[in-house]
Amino acid sequence: MIRSQELAEAFFILLKQTESKKIGSVFEAFVSYLEENNLLAQLETVVRYLESYIQKENDFNTLFIDTAFPLNEEMVEKIKAFIKVSSKVSVQTKVNPKLIGGFKATHQGVVTDASIAYNLQVLKSRLTK
């Protein structure tokens, strides 16, 4: 029997490869497949896995920025340019006073730490060698 997770992963891959105007027909074909193979009972679990895959994809493509102070849109755009991401990428910001100043950004698994706290830590390690 095919596991719900495998079904969700296959459907997720299909959705990523499908033009938006054809997603409805892909969904109908997927539900028909489940019905023909007596797998409709797994639909709720498949949807949960699918939601998880979509959330991971969205998080992977989101630029997360931690700063010591709230950012205005102009600063967000400057950070996007500094770390060379598309100006259209979605952004989530979070204030973290422990950074003192500067920012720490994460995008597609890559961390750019341009915080004062990090730079002070680097300076301290160089001076104590």
Image (spheres, rainbow, N blue to C red):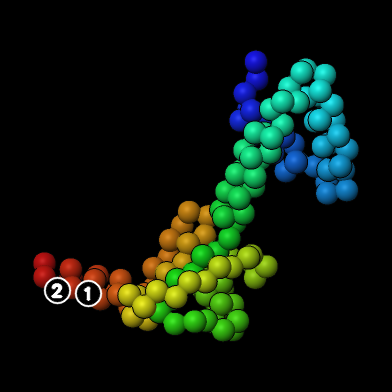
> Residue 6 at what x, y percent from top left?
63, 28
Q: Residues within 10 Å of mark 1 (few under 14, many from 20)?
A: few
Residue for point 68% across, 67% down: 88
Whether residue 97 sits left or right of residue 45 in the image: it is: left
Mark 1 and mark 2 in contact? Answer it, CB < 8 Å. Answer: yes
Asked whether residue 102 is in view, the answer is no
Compared to 28, does 126 lie above or below? below
Asked whether residue 116 is in view, the answer is yes
Q: Which residue is mark 1?
A: 123
- Rounded to the nearest angstrom, the CA distance separating label 1 from label 2 is 6 Å
Whether residue 116 sits left or right of residue 65 in the image: it is: left
> Residue 33 at what x, y percent from top left?
81, 24
What amino acid type should be assigned to the residue bearing mark 1? Answer: Leu
Q: Which residue is mark 2?
A: 127
What amino acid type should be assigned to the residue bearing mark 2? Answer: Leu
> Residue 90 at what x, y percent from top left?
63, 65
Residue for point 56% across, 77% down: 76
Whether residue 110 sits left or right of residue 17 in the image: it is: left
Q: Quadrant of residue 101?
A: bottom left
Residue for point 53% across, 55% down: 108
Residue for point 35% across, 75% down: 99
Q: Quadrant of residue 66?
A: bottom left
Looking at the picture, tell me which residue is in the foreground, 79 or 56: 56
Looking at the picture, tell me which residue is in the foreground, 111 or 40: 40
Q: Secondary structure at mark 1?
A: helix
